[in-house]
Image: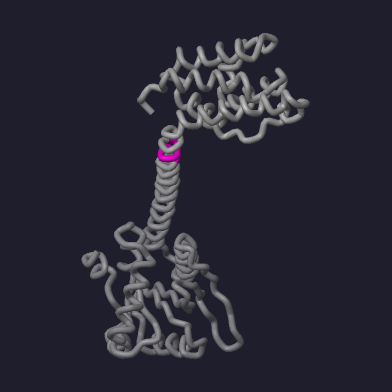
């Protein structure tokens, strides 16, 4: 806040501090706890003096260093202005009890009237600060996410030079699993059923996907695509297939699953565009699934999704 606190508000704080407690020990505790984040303001205060003398010195410090402690002063004022219980005064015998409570309540009410505007402004400040902190957390999470995706991209590029096709296949499945984890898709690595092997599975947008991953030198044949389609059809009615074939499908396989398909398909270019950060994996899967529902085709290039963004 840049607008200076009024002299009247400082005076109201001074007056309230002198009467909201009766004994010196509760007064010292109130001041010390209220200003615990700025202990230097309390350091050196002589609490053996009268409460008003201590309040005068404390308010003097706040006034002379307002540029540094304005927010502290406002929070202190608002805390005192919000007081509704005056424990040590309530233990006094009558008629002192009634008189001192009336003084305390009147002083607090006066301070409250003078600081109402500060309450609104402080709430707005806190809201903006919370937004800034949330944005910073989100930005940091995005940086970590981008770093993790870039690391997967490097692993993908390394696999292109692999000399052991079998090991490359295992490593590719592991890479895909790590990619699905980044998108919170609950991947499960390869598992065996009684009559078949599944390369993995994942969950996305309330649907379960059966995964098939192929990194072979040639496009996937129609026979391989048919075998995967049969696996998918044998699963639950909400199960879909995700066929990730680095070198794509053969022309006959693509033709077979152009008008009716139980799976969607990604090739190596699609994967690389995701790992380059050109498009998000969830956007790719969602758009490919919608395309399959509308056309029956298993394949929509990720490059078309990128150009449409």
32 left or right of 226? right
Chief secondary structure of the magenta portion = helix
Residue 84, compared with residue 173, is above or below; it is above
Q: Position of residue 191 (x, y in %)?
A: 57, 77
Q: Position of residue 68 (x, y in %)?
A: 44, 20
Residue 143, compared with residue 77, is above or below; it is below
Q: Position of residue 117 (x, y in %)?
A: 41, 34
| Quadrant showing the C terminus | bottom left
Name the residue: 41% across, 75% down: 214
Name the residue: 40% across, 89% down: 226
Residue 26, compared with residue 293, is above or below; it is above
| Quadrant showing the N terminus | top left
Name the residue: 70% across, 10% down: 48
Give the camera-side residue of 192 and 64.
64
Q: Position of residue 95 (x, y in %)?
A: 73, 25
Magenta region: which residues? 122-126
């Amino acid at each position: 806040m840049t607008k200076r606190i009024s002299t009247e508000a400082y005076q109201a704080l001074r007056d309230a501090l002198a009467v909201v407690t009766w004994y010196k020990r509760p007064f010292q505790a109130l001041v010390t706890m209220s200003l615990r984040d700025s202990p230097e303001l309390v350091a050196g205060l002589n609490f053996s003096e009268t409460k008003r003398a201590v309040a005068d010195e404390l308010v003097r410090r706040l006034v002379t260093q307002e540029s540094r402690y304005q927010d502290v002063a406002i929070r202190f004022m608002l805390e005192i202005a919000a007081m509704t219980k005056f424990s040590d005064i309530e233990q006094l015998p009558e008629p002192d009890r009634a008189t001192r409570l009336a003084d305390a309540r009147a002083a607090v009410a006066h301070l409250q009237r003078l600081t109402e505007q500060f309450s609104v402004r402080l709430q707005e400040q806190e809201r903006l600060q919370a937004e800034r902190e949330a944005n910073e957390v989100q930005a940091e999470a995005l940086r970590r996410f981008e770093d993790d995706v870039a690391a997967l991209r490097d692993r993908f590029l390394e696999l292109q030079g692999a000399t052991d096709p079998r090991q490359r296949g295992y490593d590719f499945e592991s890479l895909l699993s790590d990619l699905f984890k980044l998108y919170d898709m609950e991947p499960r690595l390869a598992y065996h059923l009684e009559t078949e092997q599944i390369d993995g599975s994942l969950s996305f947008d309330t649907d379960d996907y059966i995964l098939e991953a192929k990194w072979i030198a040639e496009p996937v044949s129609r026979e391989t695509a048919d075998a995967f389609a049969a696996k998918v059809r044998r699963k639950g009615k909400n199960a879909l297939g995700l066929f990730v074939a680095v070198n794509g499908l053969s022309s006959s396989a693509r033709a077979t699953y152009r008008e009716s398909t139980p799976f969607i398909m990604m090739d190596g270019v699609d994967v690389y565009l995701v790992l380059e950060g050109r498009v998000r994996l969830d956007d790719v899967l969602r758009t490919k699934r919608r395309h399959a529902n509308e056309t029956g085709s298993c394949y929509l290039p990720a490059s078309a999704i990128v150009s449409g963004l």
